Every structure is written in C-alpha cells, then in structure tokens.
Image (cartoon, grey):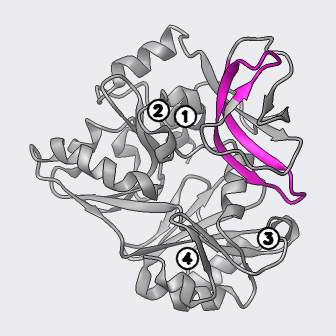
C-alpha cells in the first residue's frame, strides 16, 4: 500500500508509520510548510441505493449532513456503546460515502458492518488504492489551491470531486488532507515538494494531539465510550437523530452525566514516548487513566492525550516515571451538535 512512499525516499518504520531524513521534522512544522504521507489512515467506502439509510442506522452522525460540503465526524459503536471506530464521513457522490479512520480499524469495521449491510442494497469496500497526503503550514491553503486546483474548504468540510477530495482539519496551524488515487500520488507529491519539506506522519499525529483530537486505534478497540474522547464536544455525535447501534447507552451517559473518564491533553517531563494504553498513575501508583496518543514535540518532549478520571483532585500524576503536566484543550468540554455546525456553514 505504501510502495509509492518508499519509492520517493520515505522510510517505512511500522505498519502505520513513515519517516524521512528531514532533520527535526516537528520543529520544521513550526515555521515551514511541510507535507506528509498519512500512512496511519485508511478509507472504507459504502455504496449503493441504500447506503445512506444503512449508515443512518449504524453511525452517530446525521448522515444527511454529509452533503458533499460538510464532512462530519462520526463514530461506530457496539450495542454497549463502546467505540469500534471513529471516523470522518464524506459524501463522494449520490449513493457513495467514504469513511476515513485509523487504517488498523478499516477491515474490522468492514467485517462488523458487513453483518448488517447484507439486509440493504449497500456494499462495503476497503480502499487500499487511495493515497492520503497531509499538508501543514500557513501557506498550505494557497499551495493546495495551486497544485490541486481546488479551493480549500473550512475545517471539517470537503471540496473536490469524485476522484480527488480535499479536507481541512483543525490544529495549531492550517492542515489540509488530500485523498486521491494512489497512481496520482507520485505526481502530486513531486509538485508539493517544490515548496514543502517532506516529513513523517508523526508530525501530523502531533498536531492531532495539540488539537485534542483522538483517533481510535486497535489498542482501544471496543473499550471506550465516545464521550471519553470528547467526541460530542467535537460535533461527532448527533443527539437529535433516531436510533443507531449503541445510541441508547451513549445518550444515557450524556443525559445522566455518567461519563467518569474524559480526554485530557498533557506534556510529560521527558522524551520517552509511552506505549498506547500505558497507565497514568497517581502518587500512590494507582492507575487513574491511560494513554491514547503520544508523540514528541518540537523540543523532544512527549505530548500526549490520555483518558483520565474526572475526579477533581487526583494530585500529582506520572506516566512511566515522567511527571504529567496537564495542558489546555483548544475547545470547551460541552456538547456541540453537528446540526449547528451544518447551519453555520
């Protein structure tokens, strides 16, 4: 799947990791324009006359809001409300939707949804033939418009056509994601490199952390409620739509205030990256949370997202012996209805 990346000088470091020889990549992204292959993401297409009706019964999003302009966040849950995958939902054409999520969850979600798709005129297709490329920097919108001939959209919106799509994601700097056929990736990459430096996808993942955006990985498959990653604060849950798998549990947790763990952003006083699932411990060594994302920042300190107990006074915390310093999230922890995002345009 990543042959085009290694052919252009990229280094396959893991199944969902690529790197380049560009020095200090996270620091480069502070001031310069950078481009990255998003090897950690994958795509699942849902097509057919019943595609919208089928997704409406499975996804937390109001599927009609994915109208070719707004590309809302969504989540797929078990009947017990635990997340199987969170994703961004695009409408590619009439009867054709695309879900972007962590690549390690694409096939498991396809197998899960396939059990229900059999009762609809809907088909699922894992899109191994697509390339996902990220562009980060103040000049990213201008460069994307010139090289792709697509006017960049607003955050959580899409632009383009049925072949090439451009999405905007939040972060400390403008971020754009291009989704295109893999046989066009080499040409686009070469055009972008005329003005942007190549970096590994750890830079994109770091900006996800700084945006307070946690994409579920296989490490937390079927373990967390959507609210534990603040998904309703990001507009990823519609509380105004009808039933979907897990809806009753998700709604009850919201309306009864039963969410006992929440996503927080923090920095560790050290450069040792903890593994996903590593415990956050209090002064007595008791686990009060766990790591869901971790990357080194521009100054070689670990920045993390952790699902942490909502108890008010946890005292000093640490991860693998490194002191835990909480950082501010860039959004309030309150419900954001996707319907209101659609109304704002």
Q: Nearer the viewer, mark 2 or mark 4?
A: 2
The mark found on residue 237 in the picture is 2
Q: Residue at x 55, y 10 (%)?
A: 257
The Cα atoms of the two marked residues, 3 and 1, are separated by 29 Å
The quarter of the picture where residue 48 lies is: bottom left
Instruction: Write down the residue under mark 3.
Output: 25
First in residue order: circle 4 vs circle 3: 3
Q: Residue at x 68, y 20 (%)?
A: 288
Q: Is residue 214 left or right of residue 273?
A: left
Q: Nearer the viewer, mark 3 or mark 1?
A: 3
The quarter of the picture where residue 7 lies is: bottom right
First in residue order: circle 3 vs circle 1: 3
Q: Residue at x 53, y 63 (%)?
A: 16
Q: Is residue 265 visible?
A: yes
Q: Is residue 74 left or right of residue 275?
A: left
First in residue order: circle 2 vs circle 4: 4
Instruction: Write down the residue under mark 1.
Output: 231
Within 10 Å of disc 1 (Cα), the crowding (few <14, some 14-19, many 20+) is: many
């Amino acid at each position: 799947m990543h042959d085009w990346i290694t052919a252009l000088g990229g280094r396959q470091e893991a199944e969902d990791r690529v790197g380049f020889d560009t020095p200090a990549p996270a620091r480069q992204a502070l001031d310069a324009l950078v481009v990255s292959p998003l090897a950690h993401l994958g795509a699942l297409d849902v097509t057919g006359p019943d595609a919208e009706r089928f997704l409406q019964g499975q996804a937390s999003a109001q599927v009609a809001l994915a109208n070719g302009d707004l590309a809302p966040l969504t989540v797929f849950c078990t009947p017990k409300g635990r997340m199987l995958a969170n994703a961004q939902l695009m409408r590619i054409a009439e009867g054709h939707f695309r879900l972007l999520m962590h690549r390690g969850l694409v096939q498991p979600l396809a197998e899960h949804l396939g059990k229900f798709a059999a009762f609809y005129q809907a088909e699922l297709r894992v899109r191994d033939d697509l390339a996902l490329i990220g562009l980060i920097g103040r000049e990213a919108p201008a460069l994307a418009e010139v090289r792709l001939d697509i006017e960049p959209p607003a955050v959580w919106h899409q632009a383009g056509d049925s072949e090439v799509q451009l999405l905007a994601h939040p972060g400390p700097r403008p971020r754009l994601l291009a989704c295109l056929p893999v046989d066009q990736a080499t040409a686009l990459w070469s055009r972008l490199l005329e003005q942007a430096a190549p970096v590994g996808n750890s830079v994109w993942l770091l900006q996800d952390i700084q945006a307070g955006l946690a994409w579920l990985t296989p490490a937390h498959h079927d373990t967390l409620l959507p609210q534990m990653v603040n998904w309703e604060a990001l507009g990823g849950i519609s509380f105004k739509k009808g039933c979907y798998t897990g809806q009753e549990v998700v709604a009850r947790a919201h309306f009864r205030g039963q969410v006992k763990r929440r996503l927080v952003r923090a920095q560790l006083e050290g450069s040792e990256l903890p593994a996903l699932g590593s415990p956050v411990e209090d002064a007595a060594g008791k686990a009060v949370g766990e790591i869901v994302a971790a990357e080194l920042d521009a100054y070689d300190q670990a920045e993390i997202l952790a699902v942490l107990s909502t108890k008010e006074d946890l005292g000093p915390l640490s991860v693998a012996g490194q002191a835990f310093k909480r950082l501010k999230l860039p959004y309030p922890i309150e419900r954001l209805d996707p319907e209101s995002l659609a109304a704002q345009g």
